């Protein structure tokens, strides 16, 4: 690595997944991992293998599928069992890293670990050496480094580098640091750790004070050459540094920072959209880089300036981050060839069977509305991709409602190749009746926590997108559905969430109660 390249370490699948309600199953993690590889991240922290059987399986599969293209990292506490589990999960990866962590701050030593400084140092050294027996690429994190005494932090960093750590991560675990404070911590390490040149310094910042990105960039200015971040800033509590913001700050202000990344910036918006869709965590409209309003200009003076010269109010081009707007592309008379070309341009390399399914959906949609936009096509494709492994399918539904009638719904569902099942229910409205009928057929009772509706594109005939969050057995499940009929979209969204719960009921391999949740 040259001195002006910043390593992008993505921890969406580990720290990001710890965000409440954002847990992903193995198939979804593989989908996100594929997107991260296409995005060009240097290191994917795929999970915490000892946390649960599901985490171990996900890390193992990601290592097997993508470990020859990018470095796959597994997290481990400074414990022999953790490190052994990480080794087993990464065994099939050609490029692999074990990330070992141990708290060092006074408050963690006294109240959490009940260990003194010398015990911390000895445990850290032995853990790094144990991990080093498996692979050369070892990262060590002194948890809560931003609140650790600087002289002790220097000692821990020096000793773990001597033990074999090739990357030393300096986490602001609780989001306590400020940019100037964090800059001084990194600078102090560079000045007072004799062997610091033998390892890469990494920044891992949380956003409790809204400073994660600023702190990460400040660390980079002080000499850090790896930044740990997540898509959309997902993570514990207020989240982590947002990958898309870090990357575009470096890309846009190359004149100031003088460094670069290997990220394919045109994949930022699609990757953000994918992670939002899978986790159910919507991106706020005014979110930097990937928000719906990021490239919108409503004020008259801004619009006038934009018409004269885009750079008056736009420091980045929408196409630089792969932003998909409302571009009108196709109509009902467009052929399969034109549809395929547009799908490829939008970043979906579908096989023939998947393309045919998407084209069939497009023809149905084109019969319902005059103008089909890029956003419509993306919604159709993502909806099909989400349904690919669901056991339960919606065969048909009928609802009846009115100001003087009792809302009712009649549904037909089919589970794989079994006979079609039919049932009916009443509710507070037609959508509530649909949900209750589904629960009766699948034999699951859910609590509806969130119900969101938005228009995918523009016009009265636009596709409607419904997102739901439900709770079953104290676990959250998300679902998304699209249709020009909002009741049908709601039905698909709710069925998607129920399918996830049904999958957990069938496998029961990844119980939340068995999870170990690290803080870093």
Image: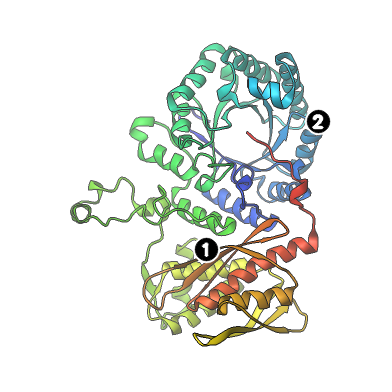
Q: Is 93 on the left or on the right of 286, as rendered? A: right
Foreground of the two, 175 or 166: 175
Image coordinates of residue 202 in percent, x first then y, are: 55, 29
**Dot 2: element:** helix
**Dot 1: element:** loop
Q: Residue at x 79, y 55 (%)?
A: 509
Foreground of the two, 277 or 474: 474
**Residue linked to disc 2:** 80
Q: Around disc 1, counting alpha carbons within 10 Å, would you say few (fewer than 14), some (14 to 19), or many (20 or more)?
A: some
Quadrant of image for the C terminus: top right
The image quarter in which residue 146 lies: top right
Q: Residue at x 42, y 68 (%)?
A: 374
Res. 98 visible in picture: yes
**Residue linked to disc 1:** 348
Disc 1 from disc 2: Cα separation: 42 Å
Up/down of 284 relative to 359, above or below: above
Image coordinates of residue 47 in percent, x first then y, are: 68, 43
The image quarter in which residue 179 lies: top left
């Amino acid at each position: 690595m040259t001195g002006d390249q910043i390593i992008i370490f993505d921890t969406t699948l580990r720290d990001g997944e710890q965000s409440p309600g954002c847990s992903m199953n193995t198939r979804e993690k593989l989908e996100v991992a594929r997107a991260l590889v296409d995005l060009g991240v240097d290191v994917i922290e795929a999970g915490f293998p000892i946390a649960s059987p599901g985490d171990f399986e996900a890390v193992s599969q990601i290592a097997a599928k993508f470990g020859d293209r990018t470095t796959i990292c597994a997290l481990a506490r400074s414990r022999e069992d953790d490190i052994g589990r990480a080794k087993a999960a990464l065994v099939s990866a050609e490029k692999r890293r074990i990330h070992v962590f141990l708290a060092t701050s006074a408050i963690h030593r006294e109240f959490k670990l009940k260990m003194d400084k010398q015990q911390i140092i000895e445990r850290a050294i032995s853990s790094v050496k144990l991990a080093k027996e498996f692979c050369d690429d070892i990262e060590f994190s002194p948890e809560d480094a931003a609140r650790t005494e600087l002289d002790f932090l220097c000692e821990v960093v020096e000793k773990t580098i001597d033990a074999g750590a090739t990357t030393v991560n300096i986490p602001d675990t609780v989001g306590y640091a400020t940019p100037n404070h964090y800059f001084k911590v990194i600078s102090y390490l560079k000045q007072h750790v004799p062997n610091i040149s033998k390892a890469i310094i990494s920044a891992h910042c949380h956003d409790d004070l809204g400073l994660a990105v600023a702190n990460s960039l400040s660390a980079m200015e002080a000499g850090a050459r790896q930044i740990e971040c997540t898509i959309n800033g997902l993570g514990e509590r207020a989240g982590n540094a947002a990958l898309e913001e870090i990357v575009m700050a470096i890309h846009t202000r190359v004149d100031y920072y003088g460094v670069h990344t290997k990220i394919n910036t045109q994949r930022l918006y699609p990757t953000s959209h994918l992670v939002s869709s899978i986790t159910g965590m919507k991106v706020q409209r005014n979110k930097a880089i990937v928000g719906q309003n990021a490239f919108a200009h409503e004020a008259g003076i801004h619009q006038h300036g934009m018409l004269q010269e885009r750079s008056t109010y736009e420091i980045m081009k929408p196409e630089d981050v792969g932003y998909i707007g409302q571009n009108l592309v196709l109509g009902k008379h467009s052929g399969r060839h034109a549809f395929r070309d547009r799908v490829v341009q939008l970043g979906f390399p579908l096989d023939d069977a998947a393309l045919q399914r998407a084209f069939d959906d497009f023809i149905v949609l084109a019969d319902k509305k005059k103008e089909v936009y890029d956003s419509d096509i993306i919604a159709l494709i993502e909806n099909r991709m989400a349904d690919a492994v669901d056991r339960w399918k919606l065969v048909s539904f009928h609802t009846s409602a009115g100001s003087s009638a009792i809302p009712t719904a009649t549904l037909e569902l089919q589970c794989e190749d079994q006979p079609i099942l039919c049932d009916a229910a009443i509710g507070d409205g037609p959508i509530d009746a649909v949900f209750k009928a589904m629960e009766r057929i699948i034999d699951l009772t859910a609590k509806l926590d969130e119900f969101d509706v938005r228009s995918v594109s523009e016009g009265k005939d636009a596709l409607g997108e419904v997102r739901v969050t439900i709770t079953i057995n104290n676990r959250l499940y998300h679902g998304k559905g699209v249709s020009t009929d909002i009741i049908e979209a709601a039905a698909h969204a709710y069925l998607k969430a129920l399918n996830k719960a049904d999958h957990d009921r069938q496998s029961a391999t990844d119980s939340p109660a068995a999870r170990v949740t690290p803080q870093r």
